[in-house]
Every structure is written in C-alpha cells, then in structure tokens.
Amino acid sequence: MSVDSASRVAGRGEPGGGGTPGDGGACRCGQCPHGAREGHRQALSAFVALREDFAAGRGVPAGLAHSAGAARQWVSDELTLSAKALAERRAAEGVTWAPAVSRRTAAAVWAAVLALLLAQALTALGTGWTAGRTATLTAAAVLALGVTATAWRHRQHAGIIAPLIGEDRRLSTSRTVAAAWVLAVLYAVLTLAVQLAAAHGPEGRRRLLPGLGLLPAGGLLAMLAIACAVAVLAYGMTAGRVRSGRVQKVPADRPRAADLLADDAGRGSFTDAQYVLVNAAVLAFALVRLAADPARLPALPWVLVLLAGLSGVTYLAGKAVTGGRPVILSIVRSRELGDLAAPIRTGDDIEIRGTGFVPPGAGTPDRLARTIVRIGAVHVPVPLVPIPGGFANPTDGVLTVPVPVDVEPGPVDVRVITAAGAETRPYRIEVQD
C-alpha cells in the first residue's frame, strides 16, 4: 500500500470531499461535524494500514531492499506524509467540533433549568409553592441567560467552555473548579436578590438582609477565594515553567472532559482528580444548604474550607514538580548482531539514551516525526520505525539516528529537539574518520 493510495483513502485526492463507491457514499467533506469525523476515521484507517504493512515488511520497493538505512528512511518519509494527512483531517474535525459543542452545552444548561423546575414542582406537591422556589427558579433562569449569551459570543470557540480552555487547548482543571464556584456564588446571590425584590415592605427585606452577613457566608467566600487563587497561581506557574523550558507542553487537538482528571498524556492524575473530587463534594454540600434555606447564603463549616485548601495546595505542588527538560544520559554506537566493536563513524547509527524525548501528548505520528537530533551543525530527523501497533523509534527514552556524512570527524556536540521545541544540553561524542 503506497502513500498515494493512503492519501486517496484519506480523502486528500478528492477536492469535493465526497464519498467513493467503496465507502458507501459517506460524507467526508470536512465542512460538517459528520463529514469531519468520517474523514478523520478514514485517514486514521489508512495510516494504520500503511504502518502495519511496513511493520510486516510489505510495501518497501525492491530497489531499497539491499540497504537497511535507505529502506528505513523511505518508510519513515512515507509514514510522515501519511501522518500529515491524518493531522489535517484531525484539525478539520476540531474546527467543526467547536460550534457543535457550543450548541450542546447551551442546550444542557437549559435542560438543567428544566430539571430544576420539575424537581421544584414535584417537591411542592405536599408543602405547596413558596417564594423560595420562585426565587431559585428565577435565579437559575437569569444565570442560564447569561451563560447562553456567553456561549453565543464564543460559539466558534466551544461556547461556554471557551474560558475554561487553556493555551494548550485542554480543559483547565483549576479554571473549571474556579468557574463552578463563581457560578454557585452567583446563583446564591441571585436567589437572595430575587427574594429581596419580591419581599413585601421594609420589614420583609430586613428579615432577609442577615442572610448576606459576612460571618455566616465567610466559608463560602473563602472557598471562592481559594479556587480563584489556585487558578491564577496554576496558570502563572505553568506559563513560567514553559517559558523557562522546565516543562514541555504540546497542544491537544481539542479539549475533552477527561482533561479534568488526567495529565497531558491522557493518564489519570492523582493531584487533578483529588482536587476536582474534593471541590465537587464541598460544592454539593453548599448547594444542599442553599436548597434547604434559600433565604441566606449557605454557611460552610470551616473544616470543609480547610480540606479544600489542602486539596488546592496538593494540586499546586503537583504542578510544581511535574514535567522537566529532555536529558541525554548517554550515546552509544548502535551495533547489529555480528558486527565488530568499533568507534562511531559517519554512516553509523547511534543510540541516544535519556528521558523526556517524547513529551506528554506528543505520541501522535505527526508529532513523533517532528523530533530532531542536531549532530554538530546537521539537523537529522528521527526516523519513524513502525512495529505492530506503534513505533519502535522514537521513544521517550531511546532515539536511534544515523550519523550523516556531512558531520566532520572529531568531537561533535549532539542535542535532541523534541516536538514541544525543548532542546537538551549538548552531549559530546567523538566521530572517527
């Protein structure tokens, strides 16, 4: 299977993006969400088929079979071209995803308001309708209107979740938690504001004003302050570490709900998960207190505030210690079975051992192909070496590259440049004639 056939399967050779007789007429125009998803699915299938063929030793031209290095470079180039087609389709899917998720999240907000209305109606069967129920529904509707306006304003950037998306196009855990507390406090304040507006006479308003007292609501305000402070500190800490090269950040294709509980590579993160779960539990407690007594801001026990504060400190500590620069630990000549021991010469393969060569989130083929090794003044792309189900090269701890003939004999500095743009410190090797 050649790269041309893979491109045709991926839809690159079809300007109109229409279906082919072999795919059942499925739309792959890239202009609608369904077409973008189908185009990405087809491109992914084409790439996987190409990679598996090369991993099994099929598809390499006979003229290159005599040279392992030439065959490996040709395979890497073919896979890189197909990976670029896959990345284009993935980007098209991300563009169509944003308006669609904006509409869905706005609909979910109003569905929540409807669910609140039904819950209030069902619980009022025995006790009757009260002013508190009217206030909670009115506050929810006003808040939903504001959220809907925000979603419309940012409809091309994922709607209401646009302020929660970080510069790396992932959902920010700290921003999401802070936004949840902001909405909860706004909802509680709006509920009291509606009751104050509907109160009969000065005496009725006087009875409601103590519900806004500083001492009873101190815990709620402290929770809001903690969540906002953690969000600001987490942003500043991450941005500073990225600029200084102490952490590698690779943009995601699009935000996902799993980002709230996982790291950049999609693995579960303890610090993120505990921060979300602790704040969700305290937030649920606050909403239950508000539902029980909508005439006052919910009073939170200070032990829950302390628990949330400790959770925030743990989250920030995790941000401070994760990540790091790529590091070269050693470089050796790559020796095939049967080869004699020898120094490194031009044309030889070298094996670079270290850590951090593949940053979290850079495991996609197009980003793996962006890994570069600088040997002296020569920039050498790290070849993609396919194996069933993945790649043997590059990996996070080992890179294998050839020493180009343009490298001058003598002491040479070697550096690795990752897909995130981070560069290792130089590691000196001796290249012989």
Image (tube, grey):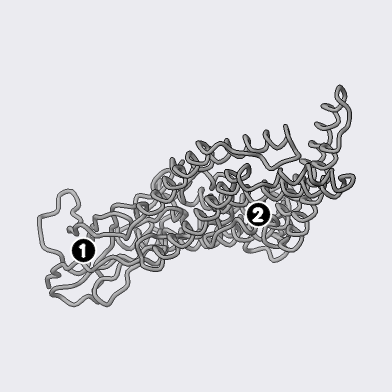
> Helix or strand or loop: what does disc 1 sit on?
loop
Dot in front, 2 or 1: 2
Marking on residue 161:
2
Q: Is residue 220 left or right of residue 363?
A: right
* Residue beneath the point at 65% across and 54% down: 161
Q: Is residue 398 left or right of residue 63?
A: left
Neighbours of disc 1 within 10 Å: few (<14), some (14-19), many (20+):
some
Q: Nearer the viewer, residue 90 or 139?
A: 139
Q: Answer yes or no: do the residues labelled 2 and 1 have beta carbons within 8 Å?
A: no
Instruction: Give the vertical position of 44 relative to 428 (above or below).
Output: above
Neighbours of disc 2 within 10 Å: few (<14), some (14-19), many (20+):
many
Residue behind mark 1: 348
Amino acid type at circle 1 is: Asp
Find residue 36 and report its image quarter.
bottom right
Q: Is residue 227 left or right of residue 271?
A: right
Q: Position of residue 280 (x, y in %)?
A: 58, 39
* Residue beneath the point at 77% across and 45% down: 191
* Residue beneath the point at 51% across and 55% down: 229
Q: Position of residue 14 (x, y in %)?
A: 68, 63
Q: Is residue 134 left or right of residue 71?
A: right
> Helix or strand or loop: what does disc 2 sit on?
helix
Query: Could you tell me which quadrant the C terminus lies in?
Result: bottom left
Q: Nearer the viewer, residue 84 or 206?
A: 206
Of callouts 2 and 1, the N-terminal one: 2
Amino acid type at circle 2 is: Ile
